[in-house]
Each structure stands twice: as C-alpha cells, then as structure tokens.
C-alpha cells in the first residue's frame, strides 16, 4: 500500500500527523490506480462537506452506503 493512501483503521487505529496526509498527496497516490472515484472532502474555510464522484448518483450513493455499513460493522466489533 502507498504511504499516502490510508485505509480507515477504525477508532483504535494508529494516528497519523495531519500534516503528513494532505489532499494533494491522496490525489497523487490515486492517479492512474482507479477506474472510478468517489471523493468526500471538507471545503476549505468552512464546515461544509462535499462529495464528488465519477459515478452516477445512484451508484455513488450505493457505495457510500456500503462504506457506512462496513464502518458500523467494524465499530460494533469493538
């Protein structure tokens, strides 16, 4: 795994220095690796989050829901 792409480790995962992991580094690590992307990020200078995807809205919602489910399953094991 590339050091700039971090799988969600759950609440007990290792902490990384936020300065080490930037949006630019994540995008650089993803370049050329994926056919489709869903990107969720916080807008600079605000508390607003946005989701940008190369997929249609229905498929994006399906995958985001699956990710949410997997995180809940992980947290339920704790």
Image (cartoon, rainbow, N blue to C red):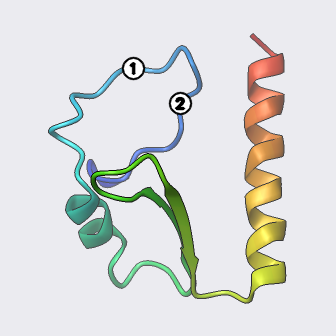
Please give left or right for residue 31 compared with residue 76 in the image. Answer: left
Please give left or right for residue 9 compared with residue 2 in the image. Answer: right
Q: Tell me which corner region of the image, top left, top right, bottom left or bottom right, holds residue 53.
A: bottom right
Residue 40 vertical placement versus 74 (above, below): below
Mark 2 → mark 1, Cα distance in angstroms: 7 Å
Residue drawn where x is 76% and y is 83% of the image:
57
The x, y position of residue 40, in whole percent, is 52, 61
User: For the view shown, which residue lies furthest in the left direction?
Assistant: 19
Residue drawn where x is 81% and y is 16% of the image:
77
Screen quadrant of the C terminus: top right
Residue 75 vertical placement versus 54 (above, below): above
Residue drawn where x is 80% and y is 31% of the image:
72
Crowding near pointer 1: few (<14 within 10 Å), some, many (20+)? few
The x, y position of residue 49, in whole percent, is 51, 56
User: For the view shown, which residue lies furthest in the front direction?
Assistant: 46
| Mark 2, secondary structure of its residue | loop
| Mark 1, secondary structure of its residue | loop
Residue underneath mark 1: 14
Q: Nearer the viewer, residue 74 or 43?
A: 43
Discs 2, 1 touching: Cβ within 8 Å: yes
The x, y position of residue 45, in whole percent, is 28, 52
Residue drawn where x is 84% and y is 43% of the image:
69
Residue underneath mark 2: 9
User: Which label is found at residue 59?
Assistant: none
């Amino acid at each position: 795994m590339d050091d700039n792409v971090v799988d969600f480790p759950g609440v007990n995962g290792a902490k990384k220095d936020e300065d080490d992991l930037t949006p630019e580094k994540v995008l650089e690590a993803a370049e050329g690796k994926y056919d489709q992307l869903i990107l969720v990020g916080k807008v600079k200078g605000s508390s607003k989050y946005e989701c940008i995807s190369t997929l249609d809205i229905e498929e994006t919602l399906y995958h985001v829901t699956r990710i949410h489910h997997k995180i809940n399953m992980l947290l339920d094991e704790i």
